[in-house]
Amino acid sequence: MEREPGDSRLFFRGLQSCSHEKMKLRKRKSASYFSSQKSTGRRGDHLGENIYLVLFTIALRLCNCFLVQTSFVPDEYWQSLEVAHHMVFNYGYLTWEWTERLRGYTYPLIFASIYKILYFLGKDSVQLLIWIPRLAQAVLSVIADLRLYSLMKQLENQQVAKWVFFCQLCSWFTWYCCTRTLTNTMETVLTIIALFYYPLEGSKSMNSIKYSSLVALAFIIRPTAIIPWIPLLLRHIWQEQRKLDLILHQFLPVGFVTLSWSLIIDRMFFGQWTLVQYNFLKFNVLQNLGTFYGSHPWHWYFSQGFPVVLGTHLPFFIHGCFLAPKRYRILLVTVLWTLLVYSMLDHKEFRFIYSVLPFCMVFCGYSLNHLKTWKKPALSFLFLSNMLLALYTGLIHQRGTLDVMTYIQELCYKNPNKSTASVFVMMPCHSTPFYR
């Protein structure tokens, strides 16, 4: 049949009218479609977060690094940078812990690698040897901060994550420690990143191999790093349906590889096979010889250590413990367990419980999120009180032991016969660094 001319005009008018109407598209349910949308939408992200947040955190921690010019404990030099200097330049002084093989070379090897690069580039000046390792530690702390934020965004929402992140960044003790080259700092960094991959309820980034590898690395750097992870590991095993598979095919291979790595590194530098983790635990835990450096009553962490480390976050932590959902009980159990275990040792220090401080920030952030009327005064109080303490401890408190090294440097440079230059130092052992 042939179409009439009038019919054709009606046909084209119908097409025009259809073109002016809104067309309904079929919704795509393909998983690959949504995954491609997400991937294109996050091209500007780094470490899973917005580039501006990453840059802000880096800038803050770099300022943090340069605004900490005081000494905390001798270990930040004598268990890391002094050892790294000796490894690269073949001179310096090693403390008795190294002759007794109580410490491992895994952590100093990080800074020894940096020193070796500076040496090859001809840039191994005193100032670079001092600041580059500190800056490297600051960058590692940035990664940990962002991982804590990402984890809370998965478990809760961006609002709660924002307050946890705020508490983490303005904590005076974190500011005081996070750029120092202490094994406790590295232990805390690895603990936070491992928690990001730990199978908490609601987490979307859980990975048993990754988190157990980070825990194992923390253990070979500082053997007591396993203490906070005992309840977390037991919980994971208890909840896992394929328990034997988890232990035999994931935990044991990871433990074997990391322990073998530690044995090989220590064999290279000690000249003999040494299990430093056993020596460390034997000396500090089994024989309890750490009391040589001081002893405290059993309640010290609860009555002094923990309140001081938390500072003005303490009331928010207590408030958050009552508000937080049940799934966070394991984090609270971990904090209490760590305090109890360390309380059984006579020798106690603030830095020993640094690794559980980020766990406490989760509860502090939850408290801030639930505040309504008093939120702004609470935020101002937290920020000002922590920053004043952070600036005091970072710029004034115990800086003399570092300032004197600048004087000694000038004395050596000005004296043509350096063998006659001498300074009589009356202070506790290893108070001053030597590599400076």
Image: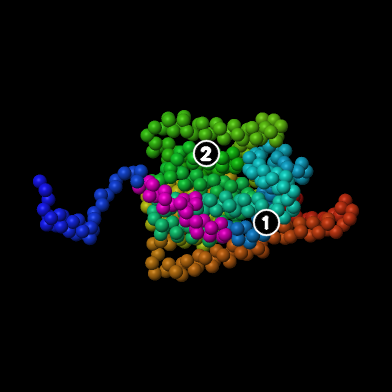
In the picture, measured across the screen, residue 14 lies left or right of residue 201, that is: left
Q: From where the camera sits, is residue 350 visible? A: no
Q: Residue at x 50, y 56 (%)?
A: 51
- Vertical comparison of 57 with 75: above or below: below
Could you tell me residue 393's position as x and y percent? 63, 61
Residue 207 vs residue 56: left or right? Answer: left
In this rendering, position of residue 235 left or right of residue 219: left
Q: Amino acid at mark 1?
A: Ser
Mark 1–mark 2 CB contact (< 8 Å): no
Give the total of numbered labels.
2
Q: Main secondary structure of the magenta part?
A: helix
| Label 2 environment density (alpha carbons within 10 Å; few <14, some 14–19, many ≥20) | many
Residue 71, label in figure: 1
Q: Is residue 35 magenta?
A: yes
Q: What's the mark number on residue 168?
A: none
Give the residue at mark 2. 213
The front one of 343 and 5 is 5
- Camera-side residue: 351 or 56? 56
Residue 359, given in percent of the width and then of the height, sits at 48, 51
Q: Is residue 68 magenta?
A: no
Q: Residue 57: where, in percent of width, then height?
A: 53, 58
Mark 1 is surrounded, within 10 Å at the Cα level, by few (under 14), some (14 to 19) or many (20 or more) other residues, namely many
Q: Which residues are magenta?
A: 34-60
Discs 1/2, front = 2
Q: Does residue 331 appear anywhere in the picture? A: yes
